[in-house]
Amino acid sequence: MSLFLIGDSITLTLLLLLILIFVYYVYNLRTNNIFRRIGMPGPAPIPLLGEMFNVIRRGMYRNDMALIKKYGKIVGIYEGTVPIILVTDLDILRNVLIKDSHMFINRRTPEGGVGPFEHGLTTLKDEQWKNARSIVSPTFSTAKLKAMHSLMNDVSDMYNERLLEYADKPETFDIKTINGQYTLDNIASCLFGIETNSLKNENIILINHLRKFFTFTLARIFLLIIFLTPRLGAYLGKKGYSFLPMDSMEYTTTIVNQVLARRRQRLEKRNDFIQIMIDHEDEIKDQEGQQSKSLKKTLSDKEILSQALVFLIAGYETTSVLMSFFFYVMATEPVIQEKIYQEIRQEIGDEEVTYEKLSQLQYLDMVINETLRMYPPFIRFDRVASKDYQLSNYLIPKGSIINVPVYPIHHDSEVWPEPEEFIPESNCIGMRFALVEAKLGIVRALRLVEFERCEKTEVPIQLGNVTILNRKNGIFLRVVRRSQ
């Protein structure tokens, strides 16, 4: 009997201790709320979760719009235990992102647990970031993108074959699936130097590992929330924990290291990111003993792997989402689709789709940009203040996180007179890797097939709830061959 009483006493003591810790946390949060101190409007934080509770309940873009509608264009919120400032005032954002960008070089990153991403451009800070960026940026110069064009064309051939298969069956399908395969094959080929051929259902083991980076199970979402709490994240990171799939990181690391070894041994050569880094190493060796202003140093193998993984994460889902919503617009706006098709026929006809010819398609540029406005792939991005900063009427301390909620800005009636209407004529864009990749796939597809609604096409489309804007129930369409 005494053992049971002791056990009950210990349980009660632990329960009381947890209650005291929780009460102290709530008291500390409310008395030390930075936004109260500086007078910035925002909701009272929910203990431990902050606005994450409402994000889970409503979805991030809906919650952002609700916050901005209620509190204005500068809102102070908590994500977990981390204070975040949402800013949608365009004049203030011009200062943060352009005029005073030297004070906002760094991005918010989880403290620990990032594995091979620790040397990536999205994780590096200050001078390390500047140095790595100076080395990596030439990868996406016009000359380098032209050199990669043939690799993209090979993938586009497989993409067109799949579309024609759907046209000949005929069969409705989720366009997001095939677009994901198209972007994965392009990124793997142009950046990693690997032929995944997911459009042909080859290399299943590698493809499954790469896809794990984009599969957010409940456990990984929970771990991500934990890592957003800096002290806890740093502690868990030192203990070897990560919210990334360890087996996939190890597998991908081995593959990239094998590619690097073959390139250094001159066993193969391709016009891709890995080769650009190898050529850069050779150039630095040739300049040894000289002071180079344009090339400061080479990247280590770990840094090359980090950049390749960053490009994979940044390019896979975003380009796939862009192309999926674009083709959704084509199916639901047949007049716009026909206008693009006529522009393609006029500017390119049946000739090869070259980099130069893609840049001539001005109306297509407008439609892509309007697709990005209505359905921005990334709902938010952020910057971290490197020193105390006067943000409008508020003096924010060093380390403050400025978060830019893209979706509310793109749907602001003060900026766009009819924000929910698709009006491509008001937009134009330039070209970089993801846009070249998307435009090439789009142009070659539209020359062959026409996209149509089917009985499973949602109008209006239901959007998902996570940080990358996505469809909730799939984007199901039908394609038919064009008569030549």
Image (cartoon, rainbow, N blue to C red):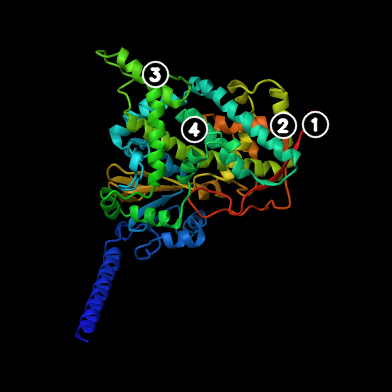
User: Circle 4 sits in a helix, a strand or a loop, which is it?
Assistant: helix
User: Do we see residue 96 in this rendering?
Assistant: no
User: Circle 1 sits in a helix, a strand or a loop, which is it?
Assistant: loop
Dot 2: within a 10 Å radius of its alpha carbon, few (fewer than 14), some, or many (20 or more) residues?
A: some
Dot 3: within a 10 Å radius of its alpha carbon, few (fewer than 14), some, or many (20 or more) residues?
A: some
| Coordinates of residue 29 in the picture (x, y in percent) | 29, 63
Residue at (80%, 31%) from the top-left corner?
483
Disc 2 or disc 4, which is closer to the eye?
A: 4
User: Which residue is label 4 attached to?
Assistant: 188
Mark 2 and mark 4: Cα distance apart in space = 25 Å
Q: Earlier in the sequence, mark 2 or mark 1?
A: 2
Disc 4 or disc 3, which is closer to the eye?
A: 4
Tell me the amino acid under the disc marked 4. Ala
Residue at (66%, 32%) from the top-left corner?
160
Instruction: Determine contact: label 2, label 1, CB under 8 Å.
Output: no
Residue at (75%, 38%) from the top-left corner?
168
User: Which residue is label 3 attached to?
Assistant: 279
Q: Earlier in the sequence, mark 3 or mark 1?
A: 3
User: Do we see residue 396 in this rendering?
Assistant: yes
Q: Of 330 and 313, which appears nearest the observer?
A: 313
State the image quarter where residue 326 is shown: top right
Mark 4 and mark 1: Cα distance apart in space = 34 Å
User: Which residue is label 1 attached to?
Assistant: 483
User: Circle 2 sits in a helix, a strand or a loop, which is it?
Assistant: helix
User: Which residue is label 2 attached to?
Assistant: 448
Q: Earlier in the sequence, mark 2 or mark 4?
A: 4
Q: Does 397 appear above or below 275?
A: below
Disc 4 or disc 1, which is closer to the eye?
A: 4
Q: Earlier in the sequence, mark 2 or mark 3?
A: 3
Dot 1: within a 10 Å radius of its alpha carbon, few (fewer than 14), some, or many (20 or more) residues?
A: few
